[in-house]
């Protein structure tokens, strides 16, 4: 009876060893697979455009209501492939962007000109501009901020009034 227990124990031990080897092989395959994916992503980013801004935010300080604040964000393509800005989207309609539409070659610079219309917007403001490009899985966000002092003009122009009655 003792021999049967040892024989049974040895058989179980062999099955456990086989299961452990299978598990170890699966773990090695999973690790190697994830490393190859990361390596492929690194190769893609090494051979891609890179956008580098001189500044990613601008404070207009204090401006008077009715003034259109303008600022130009400058960027460089620090990558190895041409950079194409596919979309530049402001957070609201009071901000209007204009940007380099042509591809920006590696080492060259481009511009994003932003205009903020302060009419009817007294008080503090913080606006964002989202920049999309041909860089895989990356967007940049630029910021403008400042304070708009209310206009002291009462004016007779009905378009300046927040409430317009009649024609």
Image: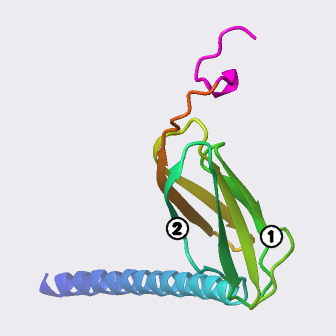
Disc 2: CA contacts within 10 A as few (<14), some (14-19) or many (>=20)? some
Q: Secondary structure at mark 1?
A: loop
Q: CA distance from mark 2 to mark 1?
A: 18 Å
Magenta range is 156-167
- The dominant secondary structure in magenta is loop
Residue 136: percent from the left, percent from the top?
68, 72
Locate residue 106: give its quadrant: bottom right
Earlier in the chain: of badge 2 and badge 1, it is 2
Q: Quadrant of the C terminus?
A: top right
Q: Which residue is mark 2?
A: 57
Residue matched to label 1: 100
Residue at 60% across, 48% down = 91
74 left or right, relative to 15: right
Direction right: furthest residue: 102
The picture places residue 130, in percent across and down from the top left corner, at: 62, 59
Quadrant containing the N terminus in the rendered view: bottom left
Q: Is residue 151 magenta?
A: no
Instruction: Where is residue 73? Give x, y as percent.
Output: 65, 71
Examine the image and state in which quarter residue 84 appears. bottom right
Residue reaching furthest to the top: 166
Residue 101 horizontal side relative to residue 79, left or right: right
Would you place residue 97 above or below residue 120 in this image?
Answer: below
Decide if residue 165 is on the left or right side of residue 146.
Answer: right
Residue 159 at x, y percent in the picture: 69, 25
Q: Nearer the viewer, residue 149 or 125?
A: 149
In this rendered view, identify the residue nearer to me: 134 or 151: 151
């Amino acid at each position: 009876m003792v021999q049967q227990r040892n024989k049974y124990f040895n058989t179980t031990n062999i099955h456990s060893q086989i299961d452990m080897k299978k598990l170890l092989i699966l773990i090695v395959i999973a690790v190697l697979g994830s490393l190859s994916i990361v390596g492929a992503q690194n190769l893609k980013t090494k051979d891609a455009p890179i956008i580098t801004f001189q500044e990613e935010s601008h404070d207009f300080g204090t401006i008077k209501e009715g003034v259109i604040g303008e600022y130009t964000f400058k960027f460089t393509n620090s990558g190895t492939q041409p950079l194409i800005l596919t979309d530049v989207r402001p957070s609201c309609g009071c901000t209007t962007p204009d940007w380099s539409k042509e591809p920006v070659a590696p080492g060259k610079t481009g511009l994003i000109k932003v205009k903020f219309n302060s009419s009817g917007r007294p008080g503090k403001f913080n606006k964002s501009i989202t920049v999309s490009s041909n860089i895989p899985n990356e967007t940049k966000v630029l910021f403008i901020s400042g304070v708009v002092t209310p206009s002291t003009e009462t004016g007779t122009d009905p378009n300046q009034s927040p409430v317009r009655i009649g024609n």
